[in-house]
Image (cartoon, rainbow, N blue to C red):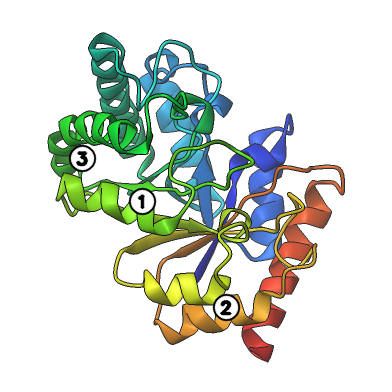
Amino acid sequence: MKFAICNETFGDWPIERGFEQAIAAGYTGLEVAPFTLGLYANQISAESRKHYRRTAESFGLEIIGLHWLLAKTNGFHLTTDDPEIRSLTAAYFKELVELCADLGGKVMVLGSPLQRNFPPEMGHERAAANAAQVLTEVVPTLEKHGIRIAVEPLGPQEGNFLNFASQARDLIDAIGSDSIRLHLDVKAMSSEGTPIDQIIRDNADWMIHFHANDPNRLGPGMGDVDQRPIFKALRDIDYKGWVSVEVFDYSPGVETILSTSMQNMKHAILSA
């Protein structure tokens, strides 16, 4: 397993300070939220992309990809019945693929609940069909750059689309491309009602990316979820991908989040 940190964790720190702290804590990968570089992908210049990538690499950090793909944007939606908005959303995903490629990344985590939730009268089946149409349109661009989208199930506290890994698998299966695969997140899985380690084992063949955290919105081991069965499951399925720490509560401070999360993950691996 390889460990990464999501870059929005650094807040308003200078990028060099964040990278230095990440390396010092033991992380070797960086997962990028596009809004930390510019509000829209097409507003992030080629020079800015090169600078960010070169700076990360100079510290020994590999940019592994993007997440929060549609966060803070307007005019895009994954499951809408409006064909024009779906077309705009697919076109924007293609721009994000280009951004990911320029940064050296290989995976794009598709969460962004506000841009995928659907009205109750639509129903999950029609929402999934609309999402499949959008993502299918992006597949050729993904294949061109060797990048994959990792579809992220999210808990009902975030929204109503893809609350279960099984629903995400159905969507992925409908698209039928190796460029669209599964992402799993501890916080999200905690609401499924099935033990987290069992969800990991059940989806080992489709999972390409993983977020470590806790339902309390802090880092792994900073809440009530026992991380040992989780990391044992990752080890048992021979997961060799990235484990990215994604938190939503930054109140403990960046240094504490980085160091405590890493210590807890290593402890979980050793004691599993």
- The CA distance from mark 3 to mark 1 is 19 Å
Q: Which mark is residue 231?
A: 2
Task: Tell me which amino acid carries mark 3.
Answer: Leu
- Which residue, given by chain and number where applicable, does mark 1 sit on? 168
Mark 3 or mark 1, earlier in chain: 3
Mark 1 or mark 2, earlier in chain: 1
- Could you say where residue 166 lies in the image, as x and y percent from the top left? 37, 58
- Could you say where residue 79 lies in the image, as x and y percent from the top left? 35, 27
Q: Which mark is residue 142?
A: 3
Q: Secondary structure at mark 2?
A: helix
Image quadrant in which the C terminus is located: bottom right
Assess whether mark 2 and mark 1 are in contact (beta carbons under 8 angstroms): no
Q: Nearer the viewer, residue 210 or 190?
A: 190
Task: Tell me which amino acid carries mark 1.
Answer: Ala
Mark 3 or mark 2, earlier in chain: 3
- Could you say where residue 269 lies in the image, as x and y percent from the top left? 62, 83
- Could you say where residue 32 lies in the image, as x and y percent from the top left? 51, 39
Q: Is residue 90 above or below residue 13?
A: above
Q: Nearer the viewer's eye, disc 1 or disc 2?
A: 1
Does residue 214 appear left or right of residue 175 in this picture? right
Q: Is residue 155 above or below residue 26?
A: above
Residue lying farthest to the bottom in this orientation: 271
Q: Nearer the viewer's eye, disc 3 or disc 2?
A: 2
Q: Which residue is found at the position 83% from the left and 56% from the top?
A: 256
Would you call the spot at circle 1 few (<14 residues within 10 Å), some (14-19), or many (20 or more)?
Answer: many
- The CA distance from mark 1 to mark 2 is 22 Å
Q: Which residue is found at the position 42% from the left and 57% from the top?
A: 165
